[in-house]
C-alpha cells in the first residue's frame, strides 16, 4: 500500500469528504484512534499494577497459588489451565471475527452470519468464565488472618501444604450475632462476620501443634517464608481479623492491592468484552436483515472486528501480567 | 478507495496456530518454572518473566498485524498508531517501575520510611 498522508488521493476533489486521510474512511480511522487511547488507558492500569508490585516486591502473592480452579475438578490443584483455556477461547473468537471480516470483503452474507454468530458465542463463554473466576476469587479457599500491622498470615502443615481455617478452628460457644439494620437501633449495620472469630482460630492453632504460619515474605528460594512453631504462636498473638476470600478491603491471598488490581483490571476488561458482545450482536442483526448487502460494503463488520481484536489483545497482556508473571 | 480483497484465510489459520502454540509454551513454562530461568534475575525481574513478556509482545504483534490487518493499511496510519503506543508505554513503564523500586528501597533500607 502506498503512503498517502493527508494529500488528495486523486487530483480531483478534496473537499466534502472526498479526501480520506491515511487512506481509510472516517469511521475506521476513528476506531483506530479510539483503540490507541483505550490501549493507553489499559497500559496505565497495568503499569500502576507494576508500580505497586515493585513497591511490595517481597510481599506480592504468587499467582499460581491463587488461581488453581478448574470446573468440575474440585480440590485438584490446576494452576492456570482454566485461564489458558479462556485465552484460547478468546483467541479463537478473534479468528472467527477475522474470518467474518474476510467473508464480508467477498460479500458472502451467509458466511458473515455464521462467523459473527460463532464470535458472539465465544465472547459469551469468555464472559461467563470470567464470572466463574471472580466467584472463586471472592469465595476463597483457605482463609487467613490479618495482624494488627496489616500483614497476612496463612496456615500450613509440616510439609508446607496449605491448611484451611475450617480444618482446625476451635468452636467456642457464644458467637456474636450479626448486626443488621433490622436489629439496629438507628440505621446500624456491620460488615458480614467471618465464619470464625480470631479467638477460635487462636485456640484451634494451640490445639494443633503440627500447624505453622506462613507469612507474605518471599525468601531467596522464591517461596513464602514459613515460621517456626514458636514464632508462629507469637505472630498469631497479633491477629486482628479473620479473612475469608477477597473483597476490596482485604483478601486472603496477600497484599490488599493485589485483589484491588485484579478486580479493577479484569473487571474493566470484562466490561470491554461485554460491550463487544453487545456491539457484535447489533452488527449481527444488521447483517441478517441485509443492511450491508444493500450498502454494498461490509466495512461495519471490519470496524467492530477491530474493537473485538483489541479486546483480545488486551487479554493477552492481562493474562501474562496476572497469571503468568 | 477500496482495496482489492483476496481471501487470506490461509494466513488467518496460520496465525491462529502461532498464537495457540505460543500460549501453550507459556503455560508449560509457567507450570514447570525451570530453575535456570526462574531463579535468575535481570533488571529486577527473573528471566522467566522476561520470556513471558517477550512472548506476549510477539503475540500482540500477530494480533495487530494479521487480525487487525494493520499490515494492509497505509504507512501513515500504521505509524501513527504503533509508534505513539510503543513510545508512551515504554516511557510510562520506565517511570512507574523505577519509582516503585525506589519506594521499595526506602521501605526496606531507609532510616525514615514514612517521609520521602
Image (tube, coloured by chain):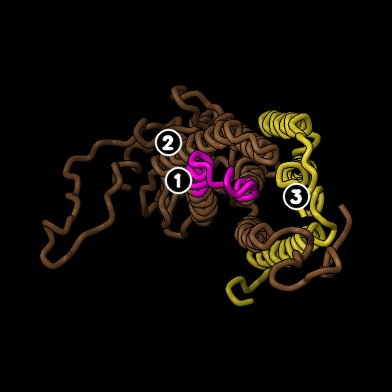
Chain colours: A brown, B yellow
Q: Main secondary structure of the magenta part?
A: helix
Q: Residue at x 70, y 33 (%)?
A: B23
Dot 2 and dot 1 residues touching (CB under 8 Å): yes
Camera sees residue A87: no
Q: Nearer the viewer, residue A32 or A109?
A: A109
* Dot 2 alpha-carbon crowd within 10 angstroms: few under 14, some 14 to 19, many 20 or more: many
Give the magenta part as a residue range: A279-302
Asked if the magenta segment contains residue A255, the reply would be no
Residue on which disc 3 sits = B45
Q: Nearer the viewer, residue A196 or A113?
A: A113
Q: CA distance from mark 2 to mark 1?
A: 9 Å
Question: Residue A241, image x and y in percent?
Answer: 36, 52
The disc placed on residue A252 is 1
Question: Residue B20, image x and y in percent?
Answer: 70, 31
Q: What chain does mark 2 sit on?
A: A
* Dot 3 alpha-carbon crowd within 10 angstroms: few under 14, some 14 to 19, many 20 or more: some
Q: What chain does mark 1 sit on?
A: A
Question: Residue A74, image x and y in percent?
Answer: 44, 24
* Dot 1 alpha-carbon crowd within 10 angstroms: few under 14, some 14 to 19, many 20 or more: many
The disc placed on residue A76 is none
Q: Residue at x 70, y 37 (%)?
A: A106
Q: Where's the C terminus of chain B, which quadrant? A: bottom right
Q: Residue at x 61, y 71 (%)?
A: B113
Q: CA distance from mark 3 to mark 2?
A: 29 Å
Q: CA distance from mark 1 to mark 3?
A: 25 Å
Find numbered disc 2 in the image and state the secondary structure of the residue it sits on: loop
Residue A87 image-quadrant placement? top right
Residue on which disc 2 sits = A141
Find numbered disc 3 in the image and state the secondary structure of the residue it sits on: strand
Amino acid at each position: 500500500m502506498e503512503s498517502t498522508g493527508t494529500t488528495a488521493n486523486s487530483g480531483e476533489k478534496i473537499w466534502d469528504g472526498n479526501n480520506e486521510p491515511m487512506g481509510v474512511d472516517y469511521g475506521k480511522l476513528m476506531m483506530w484512534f479510539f483503540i490507541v487511547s483505550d490501549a493507553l488507558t489499559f497500559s496505565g492500569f497495568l503499569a500502576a499494577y507494576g508500580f505497586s508490585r515493585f513497591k511490595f516486591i517481597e510481599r506480592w502473592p504468587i499467582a499460581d497459588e491463587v488461581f488453581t480452579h478448574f470446573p468440575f475438578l474440585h480440590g485438584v490443584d490446576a494452576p492456570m489451565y482454566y485461564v489458558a483455556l479462556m485465552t484460547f477461547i478468546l483467541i479463537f473468537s478473534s479468528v472467527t471475527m477475522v474470518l467474518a471480516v474476510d467473508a464480508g470483503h467477498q460479500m458472502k452474507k451467509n458466511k458473515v452470519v455464521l462467523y459473527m454468530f460463532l464470535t458472539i458465542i465465544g465472547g459469551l463463554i469468555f464472559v461467563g468464565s470470567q464470572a466463574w473466576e471472580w466467584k472463586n476469587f471472592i469465595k476463597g479457599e483457605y482463609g487467613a488472618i490479618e495482624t494488627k500491622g496489616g500483614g497476612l498470615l496463612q496456615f500450613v502443615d509440616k510439609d508446607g501444604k496449605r491448611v484451611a481455617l475450617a480444618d482446625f478452628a476451635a468452636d467456642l460457644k457464644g458467637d456474636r450475632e450479626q448486626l443488621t439494620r433490622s436489629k439496629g437501633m438507628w440505621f446500624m449495620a456491620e460488615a458480614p462476620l467471618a465464619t470464625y472469630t480470631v479467638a477460635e482460630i487462636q485456640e484451634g492453632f494451640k490445639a494443633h501443634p503440627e500447624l505453622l504460619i506462613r507469612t507474605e515474605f518471599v525468601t531467596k528460594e522464591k517461596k513464602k517464608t514459613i515460621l517456626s512453631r514458636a514464632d508462629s504462636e507469637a505472630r498469631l498473638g497479633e491477629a486482628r481479623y479473620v479473612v475469608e476470600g477477597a473483597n476490596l478491603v482485604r483478601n486472603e491471598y496477600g497484599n490488599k492491592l493485589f485483589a484491588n488490581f485484579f478486580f479493577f483490571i479484569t473487571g474493566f476488561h470484562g466490561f470491554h468484552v461485554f460491550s463487544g458482545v453487545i456491539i457484535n450482536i447489533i452488527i449481527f442483526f444488521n447483517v441478517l436483515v441485509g443492511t450491508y448487502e444493500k450498502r454494498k460494503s461490509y466495512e461495519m463488520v471490519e470496524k467492530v472486528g477491530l474493537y473485538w481484536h483489541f479486546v483480545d489483545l488486551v487479554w493477552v497482556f492481562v493474562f501474562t501480567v496476572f497469571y503468568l508473571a | 478507495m477500496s482495496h482489492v480483497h483476496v481471501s487470506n484465510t490461509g494466513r488467518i489459520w496460520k496465525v491462529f496456530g502461532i498464537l495457540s502454540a505460543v500460549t501453550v509454551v507459556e503455560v508449560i513454562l509457567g507450570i514447570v518454572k525451570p530453575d535456570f530461568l526462574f531463579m535468575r534475575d535481570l533488571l529486577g525481574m527473573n528471566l522467566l518473566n522476561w520470556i513471558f513478556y517477550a512472548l506476549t509482545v510477539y503475540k500482540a504483534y500477530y494480533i495487530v498485524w494479521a487480525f487487525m490487518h494493520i499490515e494492509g493499511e497505509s504507512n501513515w496510519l500504521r505509524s501513527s498508531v504503533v509508534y505513539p503506543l510503543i513510545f508512551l508505554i515504554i516511557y510510562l513503564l520506565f517511570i512507574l517501575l523505577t519509582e516503585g523500586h525506589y519506594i521499595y528501597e526506602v521501605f526496606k533500607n531507609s532510616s525514615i520510611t514514612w517521609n520521602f
